[in-house]
Image (cartoon, rainbow, N blue to C red):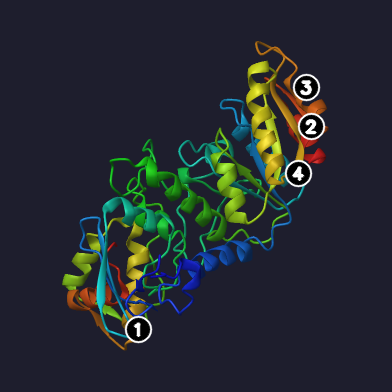
Amino acid sequence: MRIRTYHELTEADRSGLPEQIGAQRRRVAERLAGVKRIVAVMSGKGGVGKSYVTAHVARALARTGRAVGVLDADLNGPTIPRLLSLPAFQIPHPEGAVTPAVSAEGVRCISMALLLEDGAPLEFKGPSAESFVWRGAMEAAALREFLGDVAWGTLDILLLDLPPGMQRYVELCDILGGAPEVLTVTIPTPESRDAVRRAMRTALDRGSRLVGIVENMVGREFAGTAADDLAKEFAIPVLARVPWHPTPDTWSALGSRL
Amino acid sequence: MKFLCVACDQQMTFEERALPGDGTLAATFKCPKCGRVVAMLTNPMETQLVASLGVEIGGRTVPAQPLETVRKMVTTGRDDAFEDGKRETGNVGWSLDAQERLARVPNFVRGMVKRIYIDYARERGISEITPAIMDSARSELGLEGM
């Protein structure tokens, strides 16, 4: 007996799961239609200051009159609202889309920090045993909703502050249906360079344009030439070397080079 | 996933879905030719995987709500993260019992649930939402998980 395969069953299906997934993708695409550039700020290495760089670049760009959004994609360790000095914010009752919080400079932001109880970890309903099986998918769903359900409006640039590692970047590519531009952050050390190199390789393999490198925490304990090494290897510019006590000019200069 | 009635070589069609509240899911499928019905029973892990995709087996009964998965599934959400809905409710009112029941829904998701009940009542010309109406809506719209 020959049993027809999945793809051979083409009768109408009330569940329409592929259509539901397709609708989710369209929702994201339509919501981001007014966004000129999507730039993922990533490193592959923790503790190098991705969020710090993201927030300050966003503020600097907004001060020059650009329409800027920041999506805090670090769902488990969100810090962007504090770095943007966002005022207390209660999300207006959503009608079709969620209104983002807005900083004093005009940076629009969504972050899990706006939604979670103070000090509470991100926890989901669901079976606790083997939660690793579904937790990644649940976080990807949250990321998709942050992209597709927030009224971003017209933006010159949407910065996505990614957590350490590559998983969120890969999810982002899948949700967007393409690879975003990537701004890489590193500190000077060889350890950071080696970890960041892997992330950059992944981004290139996925089709991202590497915008450039920001070397953070320059000038004190962290010795090395990570930014120069990576810039040479990937043939991209070092956009900024950020000292331990940067001035507003540091961020303005970086913003102008983005 | 799809179900095939092997004897008839027919794709079975979705009939009904139930979320018993223990983390599992039951869905029935029927062969349009011979009428045979089978039930798919998923364990909590499998049910959770479906939920994490933001899709509904059997199709959507209400339009996707903003941040729907986050509001339905996050258990550590701030009570005052969202404003409660002050949306135009037309002539729809709430009985005291229904108000008490709604008040037991966590604030994080309450505004979204409230809106779904109001839309359900308005579409059917119902002037007052009672616990019985809420039960009907939950059953008809598949809101068992909310």
Looking at the rendered structure, whether the residues under marks 3 and 4 are on a common chain is answered as: yes
* Secondary-structure class at tag 1: helix
Q: CA distance from mark 2 to mark 1?
A: 59 Å
Q: CA distance from mark 3 to mark 1?
A: 64 Å
Residue B82 can be seen in this image: no
Rendered position, B51 above or below B119: above
Q: Label 1, on which residue? A: B122
Residue B121 position within the rendered picture, expressed as x and y whole percent measured from the top left: 31, 81
Q: Are marks 3 and 1 in contact (CB under 8 Å)?
A: no
Chain letter of disc 1 in the image: B
Q: CA distance from mark 3 to mark 4?
A: 18 Å
* Secondary-structure class at tag 4: loop
Chain letter of disc 4 in the image: A
Chain letter of disc 2 in the image: A
Rendered position, A222 above or below A43: above
Q: Extreme front residue here?
A: A1
Amino acid residing under circle 4:
Arg
Amino acid residing under circle 1:
Arg
Q: Label 3, on which residue? A: A229
Residue A149 position within the rendered picture, expressed as x and y whole percent measured from the top left: 52, 60
Residue B132 can be seen in this image: yes
Chain letter of disc 3 in the image: A
Q: Quadrant of residue A1?
A: bottom left
